Amino acid sequence: MSGKYKATARAHSNIAFIKYWGNTNHDLRLASNSSISMNLRDLYTTTTVTWLPDLKSDTLTINGSTAEKIAIERVSHHLDIIRQQFDIRTFADIESENNFPMGTGIASSASSFAALTLASITALGKSLPEKSLSMIARRGSGSASRSIPSGYVEWIAGESHETSYAEMFLDYDHWDLVDVIAIVSKQHKRTGSSAGHPTADTSILQDTRVRYADQRLQQVKTAIQQRDFEQFAEVVEEDSNLMHAVMMTSQPPLFYWNPLSLDIIKSVREWRLKKGIQVCYTLDAGPNVHCICVRDSVDVVINLLKNMSEDMELRTSPAGQGAYVIE
Ligand code: DP6
């Protein structure tokens, strides 16, 4: 390879309504169950990849600072997969920017690995079908497979590399759902998702969670298709609770909620069931609460959350598109 091969791509973060937790193959990141998510328009990562023949190893800056060794290793491992696929030996310089501040506890691996996948392949002068990009992004971070397609997305768990990928089932303008993220704690989580997934099977609840995951997934899909918020809310909350029940009963047990998370969880249900506000909650591997609401409920939900704690930061985003090349 000679010359300079450079490209910039952007990918959005996503919030899962049916969660991915646990793998049947950790190296390939084959999920134990299929999952569903919505891309977040206003939370994204922009990544520029330059393949440079003179480099002796991959280099990575995140928001202008040299990344930690562990982050560089994970990115290099992902580029190894791409190098192998395209039979190249060149290293790359990677500049990555998150438009949401690092250390807010909002996951960035989905948007990061989706943007990295698209930018690095485009920089090689190649273009691949969306399905292949999703499969490759999945190897870097499972949830990144869902940040490649647009809008409301299903990651089909599959049984092999070729059968495990995400695809859009409805575009972002189908239903104006908004994620109001209550940033309860900015502390870096002690056990990240990658370390958490291998513990899922140590919980005796995981089998049951996985057994009925497809049923819940169909219910959520139908609810989104029909814009049926009540049905949507009940299953999304149940699915989040099931994942956290698995986490709490694993070896070692993982407790991601803090007291304010639980206060918000209980309040959100009251707001919906007693006041008729169309909002429900879902939590990933951290204490921040994603309050999913219809557009008309956003202002009232923001006010109610602000009344619960003065120093709680909020971040809001509607549904968004998939990964795309900028230049
Ligand atoms: C709880 O995709 O972050 O957010 O593949 O190890 O990068 P890795 O895990 P990741 O796991 C996401 C877990 C989750 C649920 C979800 O987004 O589906």
Image (cartoon, helix red, strand yellow):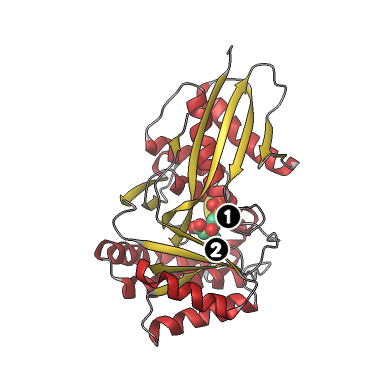
Between residues 190 and 111, which one lies in front from this camera angle? 111
**For mark 2, what is the residue?**
284
Res 107 label = 1
Report if the beta carbon of the residue with label 1 is closer than 8 angstroms to ligand 1.
yes
Could you tell me the amino acid type at mark 2? Asp
Depth check, mark 1 against mark 2: the one in front is 1
Could you tell me the amino acid type at mark 1? Ala
Res 324 label = none
Mark 2 element type: loop
- For the point 72% across and 40% down, the residue is 65
One can see residue 29 in this view? no
Q: Residue furthest left?
A: 226
The quadrant of the picture showing ligand 1 is bottom right
Report if the beta carbon of the residue with label 2 is closer than 8 angstroms to ligand 1.
yes
Q: Are marks 1 and 2 in contact (CB under 8 Å)?
A: yes
Mark 1 element type: loop
- Taking the image as shown, residue 249 lies to the left or right of residue 188, namely left
Q: Residue furthest top?
A: 2
- Taking the image as shown, residue 153 lies to the left or right of residue 9, namely left
